[in-house]
Image (spheres, rainbow, N blue to C red):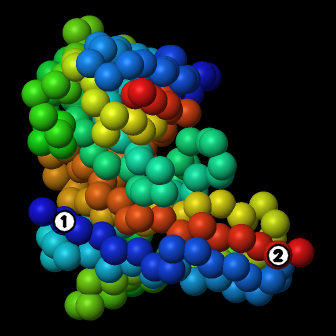
Amino acid sequence: GENVEQHPSTLSVQEGDSAVIKCTYSDSASNYFPWYKQELGKRPQLIIDIRSNVGEKKDQRIAVTLNKTAKHFSLHITETQPEDSAVYFCAASIIQGAQKLVFGQGTRLTINP
Amino acid sequence: GAGVSQTPSNKVTEKGKYVELRCDPISGHTALYWYRQSLGQGPEFLIYFQGTGAADDSGLPNDRFFAVRPEGSVSTLKIQRTERGDSAVYLCASSPRRDRYRELFFGEGSRLTVL
């Protein structure tokens, strides 16, 4: 089955700097890669996703890149703000049937003022 | 519109007891998922419902775990003979079937502690 590895497990950056989180996946059939943000004690919420037919997607300060050949994808946050502090999870799935997401282990991002 | 609602938010039980966790999905969402999240880990898939039937239960760890969704809306996750290793946050998520690439809308979770 699919296996998703995520790193780093913790990341601390100065406010205004950029943050990058990387994930690798094992199943070449996976074709959908969402990113979820989970604030302390709250529910995970989708922030951005990418499908395998594109290599990059941007939404304001957030961007995701996908390299299908290498089976890895990354989340980029620019001009970080204190409210970006949270745990971020990458995930992978196949767009067929249950579409069950396999999540990475998470990255705790801390933005220092 | 209300989001996904889960009850109880916290449940403390003793080893060997039976527990039920309830999920009320967003109205009109036909797809429903249960995930389990252990401390410091990402959510782990348990079971998926499309309508009333369990379309994929491959993530249930053993036969002590069972889930139902009799009317295609509310779902209940049932755990028999609880063990300390069952302690985790159990997350429910729902999704509208119309989306080919399904965004999951998660509930706040039910935190289960087995003493």
Q: As shown in the figure, which amino acid type bears the numbered disc 1?
A: Glu
Furthest toward the bottom, the residue is: A70
Quarter of the figure that contains the C terminus of chain B = top left
The quadrant holding residue A27 is: bottom left
**Image side of residue A27 versus residue B35, left or right:** left
Image point (53%, 69%), residue name: A107
Instruction: Between residue B32 and residue A105, name the one nearer to us.
Output: A105
Q: Position of residue A99 (x, y in %)?
A: 24, 50
Residue at disc 2, secondary structure: strand
The quadrant holding residue A10 is: bottom right
Image point (21%, 60%), residue name: A94
Query: Which is more foreground, mark 2 or mark 1?
Result: 2
What residue is pinned by disc 2?
A112
Quarter of the figure that contains the N terminus of chain B = top right
Q: Position of residue B78 (x, y in %)?
A: 27, 18
Please give the chain letter of the residue carrying mark 2. Answer: A
Q: What is the spatial separation of the Cα atoms under label 2 and label 1, in whole angstroms?
A: 35 Å
Mark found first going from the N terminus, 2 or 1: 1
Q: Position of residue B84 (x, y in %)?
A: 34, 34
Q: How many marks?
A: 2
Q: As shown in the figure, which amino acid type bears the numbered disc 2?
A: Asn
Q: Is residue B77 above or below residue B113?
A: above
What residue is pinned by disc 1?
A2
Instruction: Between residue B51 and residue A22, name the one nearer to us.
Output: A22
Instruction: Between residue B78 and residue B16, name the one nearer to us.
Output: B16
